[in-house]
Each structure stands twice: as structure tokens, then as C-alpha cells.
Image (cartoon, rainbow, N blue to C red):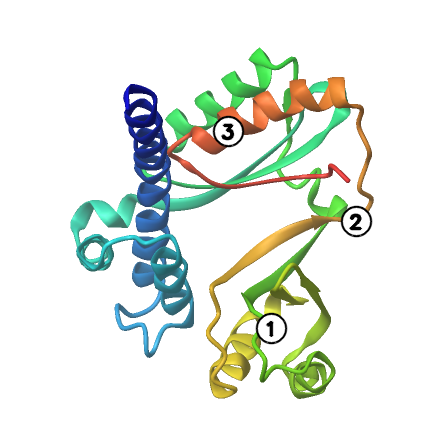
């Protein structure tokens, strides 16, 4: 009984720890999306997607509503989206996307993470050409979905690639077609579980297990930073 209790307790703490880290990031994405457009998900595709992603992570409705309301608050005007790029241990390329109300604090923290890992920040735009920006949509494969038929349906919406892995379907399109693809999937009554813009490496690099240990330490630190929304890398 003691071990079972400790296991449940550890499992619950781990789950709460994950939520305590991801909910602020999801909330910030919702606030930024609502501020950029209108605070109505029916008229704002970016906001609709941010809410969708939050729901997929079981973020409570009250948290989502509060994040939308924050978009009209005075301090929300200070939020900016900014990117930082760097070379980590063993030459890994890392691209971070941030949403912050204090860029000075954010860049200092990002620089600290890289420096402690033996890496360095590079000028903004240096790694842009090393990654392709893609709109990526994920949803469950159901019995009534035929991959080949779906591919034909989505070509006009900018579909570039579609694949299935362990019951999940992934659709890729150029980032400029995010809205088109989102509407096309909605019209097909497909319930998307996650949709976002990703930076996919044009030339992925393989690293040894030992090298990956050092690299993953840095990535973990960056992902734990409250100001960093997404971390991309060129690991194969």
C-alpha cells in the first residue's frame, strides 16, 4: 500500500508539474492570438487554433477565458513575439520562439542557458534558411478516413505531405497556408487535436547518444523557460 501510494503521489506531482509549465505557455499563446486579431475564435483562426491546442492539453475553460480577457488588458500590449537562434553543444542548431513582456529578461535568460551548455547565440536570421516553416496539423485516424481520398481533398488547401504514425495523421503545408488548411479540415468535420507552425530542419543531423545527453539538457532548460513558447532543432 505504501509503494502504491507513493507511486500515485509521484505520478500526480509529475502531472501537476507538467500542467504548471505548459498552461502558462498555452495561455500566453491565446492572449497573443486574441490581441493580434479579434477575441472571437469564430473570426480569428489563430485564436481558434490556440484554444484548440489548450483544450487538447486539458486546460480548464476558466483558464482559457481568462487568457482571452487578458488580451484587452493594458499590460497585454507589452507582449511581443521574438525569436532567438543559437548553436548548442556539439554544433546543434536551435531556434527558439518566445512571447514576452520583457525582451531584456528573456534574451538574458536564453543567453545564460546557451552559455552554461557551452553554446552561443547567433545573430537573428542566421539560421532562418536552415529550417522550413510549416503548418502542421495532427488528428486521430478513424475508420471513415481514407488517407488517399483525404490527400486529394486537401491539395487545394496547400497540402504538401500527409503521413500516419501509430494512429495519428499528420498534415504538412507551407506556413502561409495555415488558415486555408485549418478551414479545409473544419469543412471536412475533422477534429484536429493539435495545430501549430513548426520549423523543420532542411538538413537534419545525427548525433551520438553521448552528444544527445548534453543537447537534451539544454533543450530541457529552454523548454522550461516561461518566456519560450517553442524550441526547434536540427536533430535527425
In this orientation, which residue lies closer to the viewer: 92 or 107?
Answer: 92
Q: Residue at x 57, y 29 (%)?
A: 219
Q: Is residue 85 above or below residue 110?
A: below
Q: Residues within 10 Å of mark 3 (few under 14, many from 20)?
A: many
In this orientation, which residue lies closer to the viewer: 54 or 43?
Answer: 54
In this orientation, which residue lies closer to the viewer: 72 or 222?
Answer: 222
Which callout, 2 or 3, points at the residue further toward the start of the chain? 2
Q: What x and y, as percent, mark residue 98? A: 46, 40
The residue labelled by disc 2 is: 202
Q: What x and y, as percent, mark residue 99? A: 40, 43
The residue labelled by disc 1 is: 177
Q: What x and y, as percent, mark residue 129? A: 75, 47
Q: Determine whether the residue tagged by mark 3 lies in a helix, strand or loop.
A: helix
Q: Is residue 205 left or right of residue 200?
A: right
Q: Residues within 10 Å of mark 2 (few under 14, many from 20)?
A: few
Residue 222 image label: 3
Q: Determine whether the residue tagged by mark 2 lies in a helix, strand or loop.
A: loop
Which callout, 3 or 1, points at the residue further toward the start of the chain? 1
Amino acid at each position: 500500500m505504501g509503494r502504491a501510494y507513493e507511486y500515485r503521489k509521484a505520478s500526480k506531482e509529475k502531472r501537476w508539474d507538467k500542467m504548471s509549465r505548459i498552461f502558462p505557455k498555452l495561455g500566453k499563446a491565446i492572449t497573443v492570438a486574441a490581441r493580434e486579431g479579434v477575441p472571437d475564435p469564430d473570426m480569428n483562426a489563430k485564436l481558434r487554433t490556440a484554444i484548440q491546442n489548450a483544450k487538447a492539453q486539458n486546460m480548464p475553460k476558466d483558464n482559457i477565458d481568462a487568457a482571452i480577457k487578458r488580451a484587452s488588458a493594458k499590460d497585454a500590449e507589452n507582449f511581443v513575439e521574438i525569436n532567438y537562434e543559437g548553436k548548442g553543444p556539439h554544433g546543434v542548431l536551435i531556434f527558439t520562439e518566445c512571447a514576452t513582456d520583457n525582451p531584456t529578461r528573456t534574451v538574458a535568460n536564453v543567453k545564460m542557458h546557451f552559455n552554461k551548455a557551452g553554446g552561443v547565440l547567433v545573430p537573428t536570421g542566421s539560421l532562418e534558411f536552415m529550417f522550413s516553416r510549416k503548418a502542421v496539423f495532427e488528428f486521430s485516424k478513424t475508420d471513415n478516413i481514407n488517407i488517399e481520398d483525404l490527400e486529394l481533398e486537401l491539395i487545394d488547401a496547400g497540402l504538401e505531405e500527409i503521413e500516419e504514425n501509430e494512429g495519428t495523421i499528420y498534415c504538412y503545408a507551407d506556413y502561409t497556408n495555415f488558415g486555408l488548411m485549418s478551414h479545409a479540415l473544419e469543412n471536412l468535420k475533422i477534429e484536429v487535436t493539435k495545430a501549430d507552425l513548426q520549423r523543420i530542419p532542411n538538413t537534419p543531423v545525427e548525433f551520438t547518444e553521448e552528444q544527445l545527453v548534453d543537447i537534451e539538457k539544454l533543450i530541457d532548460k529552454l523548454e522550461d523557460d516561461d518566456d519560450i513558447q517553442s524550441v526547434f532543432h536540427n536533430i535527425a
